[in-house]
Amino acid sequence: MLYLIRKMRSQLNSWALLSVIFSTLILLPALLIMIQLFAESNENWEHIKEYMLKNYIVNSVTLVSFTGFFTVLIGVSTAWLVSAYKVPMHRFFKWGLILPLAIPPYIGAYTYHGILNYTGVIQTTLRNQFGIKVDQKYFDIMNIPGAVFIFTMFLYPYVYIITRSFLENQSSSLIENARLLGKGSFMTFIQVVLPVSRAAIVGGVSLVILEVFNDYGVVKYFGIQTFSTAIFQAWFGMGDIYSAIKLAGTLMFIVVLILILEKVIRGRKQYSYSTSKVRPLQPKELKGLKKVAVLSFFISLFALAFAIPFIQLLQWVYMTYDVILSAAFADLIWNSVFVAAIGSVFIIIVALIIANFSRLSKGWIGKLFSKITVLGYSIPGAVIAIGVLTLFLALDEKVITLYEWFGLEPTLVLSLSISMLIFAYVVRFLAVGFNSIESGFDKVGTVFTEASRTLGMSVTKTFFKVDIKMIKGAIAGGFILVFVDILKELPLTLILQPFNFYTLATKTFQYASDERIHEAAVSSMVIICISALSIFFLHRVLEKEPK
Amino acid sequence: MFVQIKNLTFHYKNSQKPLFENLSLSFKQGEVSVILGESGSGKSTLLRLIAGLEVPSKGSIQIDQAVMNDNFRFVQPEKRGVGLVFQDYALFPHMTVEKNIKFGLTKMNRKQKQARMEELLAIVGMEDYASRYPYELSGGQQQRVALARAMAPNPSLIMFDEPFSNLDSKLQLQIRDELQEILKRTGITSIFVTHDEEDARAIGDRIILMNNGKIQDEGRPEMVLQKNKEKLSLAYV
């Protein structure tokens, strides 16, 4: 007991205090939803539960299962082919196959719809050049299989990246041994590669699943009823925050179940097993028919998941840029950059504080804080938005009483303000910045901090003079990742954006919803280019890092 | 006694068995003490406890009459006035030699800092290297800078964690002699941690033989080494 008190005293400083405050704030929205989930139900909710909930669950689960299956299929096979074999343009495909991640699925969705519909490039060419009229049903992608296609094309890189880096760095001796023992390529893949990379695959596919649950743009555009669309309907359609909370709570519950499932499936296996010598797997040259087959697979995948939609968007940009590029568009960019920059700065500051505390305190308290910060990333954007909205509405009630007390006109001050939006971004994307900074800290260790402290510097002085300077790269990387994530964010921003305030993402979505898909191209292109740059940058940084 | 450790108990988290249990030990002013033991015997942890980098579960530590920790108090490492030279030196890679040495000189004005820095570079014979970065120095040079940096704030006690383990054997002898000379000249109280019998014999006024967190023997180097010859040779086979 004495020991505990002493231990606490040695750590009870402003760092601990700030960490507690921030973690509590981060946790509040989720907690509010949890509490409300068990509150009494109203009529709307009874109606939703009775007639619609089953449909939401079935649709969401169908989307998640099929997308999960196909992303594993494509992600794992590309990861294996890229790391084990050499084909022409190997280096290009190695990172080119990550590029689809730069296209947010909702942009991919309306682009593909634009390509395939009656007035799209394929059908008009067929009609005008060849006089062929096609049956519309073969060209309709606005349904569940279509959504699965879109999700698969633009999300498979999650599985690909994680599995590939595992295969390249961890498994060379196993794979070489399998080859020496006389196994052919295919049997090696089935008997060795798949089982050893199970943890990596599960890690990648759970990211995909979280993204699908998070999505609002694709399903809304395609007219598929899921939890996200239902939350929007409850809040915007019926103004019923109460049912929105219940829906959000149910969705959160499902997501938590999936996270638990992930832990169970992954078991005690980690992404990496520890061997002191990491030897990269040497890819071998492919010849003849096999070479042609692998190459055509890569080319078609790259075309479908990146080149075709990208080129189509370029054409639309060319058609519309003179109308779109105006003062209003400059405002749009300013808004996006503004919220993304402020949000990223807050996230990096909070992440630095909690990560520094958690690393220096070493014990379970620090671990707990780092777990809490990561929570938001698993929770779909719409759910966080509803939680944050509930929190701010409650705060506003207090503020209004305060206003009346001072004899001022009561108004909603906090709700639907930019500060609420930015707070929600911090909750949602803190994990992204935190992971980057934590791994930066892990790499430098604590020895420099300790050296500084024995030289007479306090924790805080050490932080500014030593720690922060040693993880500059990690801070920059984390900032870029968060910035791009906020820039692309759709569902949360749609719910929480202040009146008449649009970001690139929400304006894009609005154009697309209004069937003005050509006009959406310019803002889409900006988002895609910034994302692609950040992917390129991070890829380069990762490549350069000593193994 | 300059450093007084009483009934110190310490466990690592996740470990049921304490590394130290009721350990008592003291160090005289101006003395060069060597803690000799195999790796894992707890000798580095003892240094970290004295420096305040680990929190003991029981017991007290006093340095120069002042209580560093007991059941009620815990003085933070930056307030202890203890210098520590780390095994891998821990020179700040983003600072030059000059900046590294000036790092701990907080209560001086610019002129005083410069003078102190030059004084220390002269002591360790590195006058020409002030503007170099740590990665531009050899292992032996880094070692000397680390010593200069630890000594700069004028600590009442300086501790060395395996200071020679990263040096090749020829350099090891040279640095060891230099270090001994510097310590004698400055008269600073110092504690070394090493697993090398020869180092212990050469540098120590007193040897403390440690095994599994317990003190096996202590005294003048020749006596301790002679008496425990068999045990030591067994341990290092």
Image: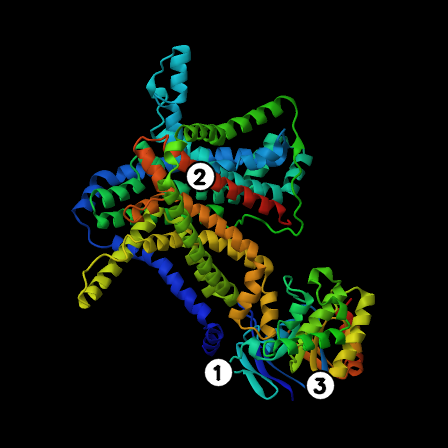
Alpha carbon separation for disc pair 1 and 3: 29 Å
**Image: B47 above or below A494:** below
| Residue B8 visible from this viewpoint | yes
Q: Can you say whether B107 is above or below A87 in the image?
A: below
Amino acid carrying mark 2 in the image: Val
Residue at 45% of width from left, 65% of height from top?
A: A365
Q: Which residue is mark 1?
A: B72
Label 1: few (<14), some (14–19) or many (≥20) C-alpha neighbours in 10 Å: few
Who is closer to the viewer here, B3 or B112? B112
Q: Which mark is residue B30?
A: 3
Q: Residue at x 43, y 29 (%)?
A: A318
**Image quadrant where one finds the N terminus of chain A:** bottom left
Residue A459 x %, y %:
52, 70
Measured in 3D between alpha carbons, the distance from the residue under mark 1 to the one under mark 2, in whole angstroms, is 60 Å
- Residue drawn where x is 65% and y is 48% of the image: A278
Can you tell which quarter of the image residue A145 is in? top left
For the residue labelled by badge 3, is the local secondary structure a helix, a strand or a loop? Answer: loop
Do the CB atoms of the residues marked 1 and 2 lie less than 8 Å apart? no
Q: Nearer the viewer, residue A497 or A116?
A: A497
- Residue A354 in picture, x, y percent from top left: 46, 62
* Chain letter belonging to callout 2: A
Residue drawn at (67%, 38%), measured in percent from left and top?
A282
**Amino acid type indicated by mark 3:** Gly
Image location (x, y in percent) of residue B18: 57, 73
What amino acid is labelled 1 in the image? Phe
At mark 2, the secondary structure is helix
- For disc 1, the chain is B
Which residue does the numbered mark 2 point to in the structure image? A526
SS under mark 1: loop
Dot 1 or dot 3, earlier in sequence: 3
